[in-house]
Amino acid sequence: MNIQWYPGHMTRTRRRMAESLKQVDAVCEVVDARIPQVSRNPDMDEIAGNKPRLLVLNRTDLADAEMTKQWAAFYRRQGYAVLTTDAKSGAGVAKLSATVRSMLAEKVKMWNEKGQTGRPIKLMVVGIPNVGKSTFINKVLGKKSAKAADKPGVTRGQQWFRVESGLELLDTPGILWPKLDDERTGIYLAVTGAVKDDILDVETLGCKLMEILYRRAPQSLVSRYKIQLPAEDETFDFLGYELLMRAGRKRGFLISGGEIDTERMARILLDEFRGGKLGRITLESPDEYEGDGNG
Ligand code: G4P
């Protein structure tokens, strides 16, 4: 995914979303459970206004299970309904309908009282690119084929999908942007593969990922790369680079002159992390955001 988030695009999407919002009962935002806050659209609170909100923590197969619980509790405290899913296998997806019904229980009761029993609940599904939104929608619909063919930057008309269980889904009318003005967000999106590597060169990104993993899940580095972690009193100007060198040395990635091929090691690290080979790791925790709605 590589897209220019130009202001015109954002303004148009905002406008179309405001229009679409009038037609729905609630908003369902899909995020990546490894980076729940980073993978949210920064303007969603404002855009969604006071519509009831459901957050889908997707990619739970790649995230730390305990951290996913903490994130779910964090969002529930903020008034969101929460669903945890692995859209690729479909785990959790079947609970969508029940979760939405319970979120909108009051409204459904009111409809029933007015004799509108069986009125379908309309839900707008949103998410920044690559969080797994299309995979999620396809799983909800029970389809195998990927409508995920939509490419970022290509606009299209409204897409309504009818789910058998009295639910109608509206796909985002446009492409939603991530937080754009923040280096940390860019790095987290890049290391998880949500944006293309080329926001940073691969070696720098590998160093950044090493530093994040060293803080979040140091044991994953020990078990995957058999490296010794620096002692508490050891300090490095470039910790991430040092760790890349240690891992590269263990893997025997040498270039002429006996130098370690840190670029190759960085590429391997990124691939293996994205593929879940280092284990289930969540890169940010709710404590970083406690008392704060949107990062
Ligand atoms: P988007 O609409 O939000 O842009 O994302 P999309 O559904 O196209 O999904 C992006 C990638 O993420 C896809 O992988 C998809 O299979 C994967 N994915 C979606 N949900 C999950 C999940 O819960 N767990 C895991 N592990 N992966 C998920 P891809 O490599 O682009 O395609 P493919 O390898 O599946 O063919």
Image: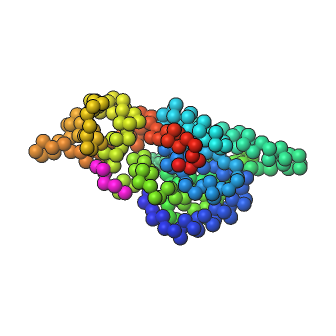
Residue 265, placed above or below residue 202: above
Front-most of 128 and 289? 289
Is residue 104 inside the magenta stretch?
Answer: no
| Residue 108 rendering spot, x and y as whole percentages | 80, 45
Judged from this view, the residue extending furthest toward the bottom is: 8
Q: Nearer the viewer, residue 291 or 162?
A: 291
Q: Which stretch did the figure color magenta?
A: 199-204
Q: Is residue 29 left or right of residue 191?
A: right
Q: Residue 148 at what x, y percent from top left?
A: 53, 54
Quadrant in which residue 248 is drawn = top left
Relative to 249, is 11 on the left or the right?
right
Q: At x 84% / y 47%, what residue is drawn?
A: 110
How many marks are shown on the rendered structure?
0
Residue closest to the eye, 30 or 167: 30
Q: Main secondary structure of the magenta part?
A: helix
Q: Is residue 60 visible?
A: no
Q: Residue at x 26, y 37 (%)?
A: 235
Q: Is residue 200 magenta?
A: yes
